[in-house]
Amino acid sequence: MYDILIVGAGPAGANLARLIGDKYKVLIIDKRDLENSNPRPCVNKCCGGLLAPDAQKMIAQMGLGIPKDILVDPQLFAVRTIDLTNNLERLYQRFYYNMDRERFDKWMVSLIPKGVDKKFNSLFKGLVKIPGGYEVKYICNGQELTATTRIIVGADGASSKVRKLIGKDTNIPEQYIAIQEWFECSYPMPYYTAVFDEEISDFYSWLIPKDNYLLLGAALKPRDNTREKYDMLKRKLSNLGFNFENKIKTEGAFIFRPTKVSQFFAGTDGITLIGEAAGAISPSSAEGISYALKSSSYLVHSLEKGIDGYFARYKNMVKNIKFNLLFKNIKSPAMYNPFFRNLIMRSGLLCIK
């Protein structure tokens, strides 16, 4: 019987396994193959691959450094902000690391202690309450398996099946579909790009140069003609001189946008949520790695005194995340209300001249 079974080996799940693997008997499962150098492309993480300052700070606090083979060219220090609604453009200084997200996740997994059992190419199917814990069913390489555990940790992202199974599917954060396409790009681009257009989305879109490619992504509302809105975005940006002719691949994923603190859900005693599964993601930028590392670290600290009483300690610690989400929601209108965004951009405040 395992002490802890972790569903999802992204930054939240991998960081948790890394920090508790020497103290507890742990099993971690993920649908991706995070130990194979040639994974199945259909299950790669859809992500722009920018490591924000908050995530950099968390990595520093954990005493880690990013290996250079995770970083990709170019490393840039400016974001070109295009407001198509107000017909405005500005350039702002920002400090992101441009990285390969797949390599980042594999690096996090490589830090997990050898004593942790890892099952990749594995799909979580369900759970049953049993005396002393839970029985978990999952499919690994086409074979249905079961495992028993005292605690289940859901680190399985915005479409978290663990969260749905414990009855919190009614108060989830607002859900968006992220569509991202990769294009061949031979010309240099000295900035990342953020695009705002009320006709396309009340969230935002992005352009990220990455080695010899250009990534175009958008966060769109489900069931709102998402593909048509994405194609409209491409047409509008093509008129500004961007080239989207040589497409390499398309990716997609659900992402959360918590608009109320009550949408953050830590789970229950015995079935606990971390990272985006709990609703821990920035409502202003959709940045989730810093929240994944922070929430998993809080759970680690709550387990230091043992499993008994861990959940009460975890709930108390994540109040810090709730406060941060509240602050980000107060800040959001400056970015997403067209009137306020127009005033701020026209003022030229903090922009690069």
Image (cartoon, rainbow, N blue to C red):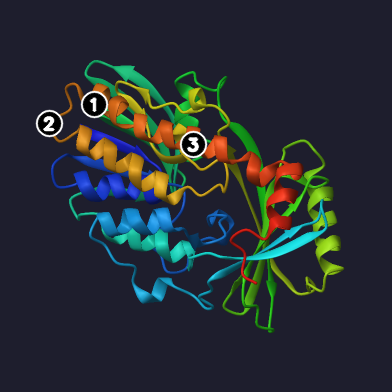
178 horizontally vs 290: left or right: right
Task: Identify the mark at residue 313; answer none if there is no mark.
Answer: 1
Q: Which residue is mark 3?
A: 327
Residue depicted at x 83% and y 68%: 238
Viewer-nearest of discs 2 and 3: 3
Viewer-nearest of discs 1 and 2: 1
Q: Is residue 233 visible?
A: yes
Please state which amino acid type lies under the numbered disc 3: Phe
- Mark 2 surroundings: few (<14), some (14-19) or many (≥20) residues within 10 A: few
The answer to whether residue 81 is above or below residue 153 is: below
Question: Residue 278 falls in which quadrant of the image?
Answer: top left
Residues tagged 1 and 2 counted as in contact (Cβ below 8 A): yes
Q: CA distance from mark 2 to mark 3?
A: 31 Å
Q: Is residue 9 visible?
A: no
Residue 353 vs residue 283, the one in the foreground:
353
Q: Secondary structure at mark 1?
A: helix
Please state which amino acid type lies under the numbered disc 2: Lys
Viewer-nearest of discs 1 and 3: 3
Q: Which residue is mark 2?
A: 305
Image quadrant holding the N terminus, namely: top left
- Mark 1 surroundings: few (<14), some (14-19) or many (≥20) residues within 10 A: some
99 horizontally vs 250: left or right: left
- Mark 3 surroundings: few (<14), some (14-19) or many (≥20) residues within 10 A: some
Please state which amino acid type lies under the numbered disc 1: Arg
Residue depicted at x 82% and y 42%: 225
Q: CA distance from mark 1 to mark 2?
A: 10 Å
Residue depicted at x 41% and y 37%: 138
Residue 73 screen position, x and y as percent: 52, 78
Sooner in the amino-acid sequence: mark 1 or mark 2: 2
Residue 194 screen position, x and y as percent: 66, 59
Q: CA distance from mark 1 to mark 3?
A: 23 Å
Question: Residue 268 falls in which quadrant of the image?
Answer: top left
